[in-house]
Amino acid sequence: MNPGHTDHEPHTATNHVSLLVRTKACHRVNETTDPEWWSGNGTAHPRTDLAGRRKALVYPRLVRLRAHAILLFGCLGIACHDEATRRCHDVMASAQELVKNVDAKDLASVQTSLSAVDQAIEACKTAKRTSEVDALTRARNELGAHADYLKKRAERPDRKKPSAEELAALVTKGDPNCPKGQAYKQEASGKEIRCTGPQIVDMSFPEAEKYFGNRGYKLTTSATPPTLTAEYGAEKYVFTYAAPGDEHAPRCLTVYPAPGLPYQEATGRATGVLMKKIEKDGTVKTAHGEIPIHVEESETKLVIRLGECG
């Protein structure tokens, strides 16, 4: 699903499977958490078990984190050359155990793992173990992004439950308050609701303001050029419109994804386009036409520009 939250919510997932995923840390997620995180566009996968029955999604950032962990702690078998290196590897081993057993639904558990990884980073910096520091930093970014998500979810106000009539309308007509191509299960009834609203890249000023405002993002505006910025932690969307309060799609959408999110996934969440069809400096099809995409990527920064960004 795409980032953000609606009244009824299942959580993000891209099944990057690793050996460590098959631990109890790969918790099932309440299917009513974030509808935009379960998508039919290739940005997330249906909830199924080995028999093909639908199940809840796992937290993708922690799935990716455990994939990092296999590489991260593979170096522990290397002979230690000095006391600083031994400490680096000892602290990494302790962090591994916490990461493997993290409760993905519990902020305190995630923060404990985050703290352990931070300690390992400092120990390995002292030992001048560059490869270990790089791997730990990638793992730290995954944990930090997931902790931000849990904080954002906890701060969200309770939503009004739909009446029987409203629920029936949602089942038959779909939900216009989440991007088309996504779906979620309504908490009380367990019924699956299709999303029928615009993709993030197609949202008018009022639509973007409502969508992100309802999801706890900090909103700021500017007049020259007409801009709406929605941000939460390191994640940020900047909409540039042709006119203040524009009822049309933005001329440019600049996306600063949460740390650790690949540009294909971040672009898929914003556009609904299949990840396999997304290329750097290519084009993507949207409801308001085919638009250019430009990606700036380094080890410390990822910026995606969609549209005529100048």
Image (spheres, helix red, strand yellow):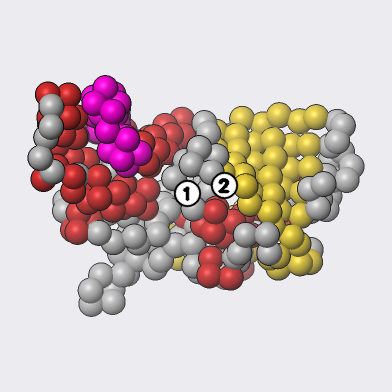
Query: Vertically, is 140 above or below 39?
Result: above
From mark 1 to mark 2, how far is it between C-alphas? Answer: 11 Å
Q: Toward the viewer: 26 or 74?
A: 74
Q: Which residue is located at x 44 percent, y 62 percent?
A: 44
Query: Vertically, is 31 above or below 289?
Result: above
User: Earlier along the polypeptide chain: callout 1 or callout 2?
Assistant: 1
Q: How many marks?
A: 2
Q: Which residue is located at x 28 percent, y 73 percent?
A: 53
Q: Residue furthest right?
A: 243
Crowd rating for badge 2 (residues with CA inside 10 Å; few <14, some 14–19, many 20+): few
Horizontally, residue 146 falls left or right of residue 278, namely: left
**Residue bounds of the magenta highlight:** 110-135
Q: Residue 113 in magenta? A: yes
Closer to the eye: label 1 or 2: 2
Element class at badge 1? loop
Q: Which x, y percent locates residue 40?
A: 50, 69
> Which dot marks residue 261?
1
Tell me the kind of residue under disc 1.
Leu
Residue 127 in view, yes or no: yes
Q: Image quadrant of residue 108?
A: top left
Q: Which x, y percent locates residue 101?
A: 17, 42
Element class at badge 2? strand
Horizontally, residue 22 falls left or right of residue 233, namely: left
Crowd rating for badge 1 (residues with CA inside 10 Å; few <14, some 14–19, many 20+): some
Q: Main secondary structure of the magenta part?
A: helix
Q: Which residue is located at x 20 percent, y 54 percent?
A: 20
Q: Image quadrant of residue 260?
A: top left
Q: Residue furthest front?
A: 81
Q: Toward the viewer: 213 or 21?
A: 21
Residue that mark 2 sits on: 297
Q: Which x, y percent locates residue 198?
A: 68, 59
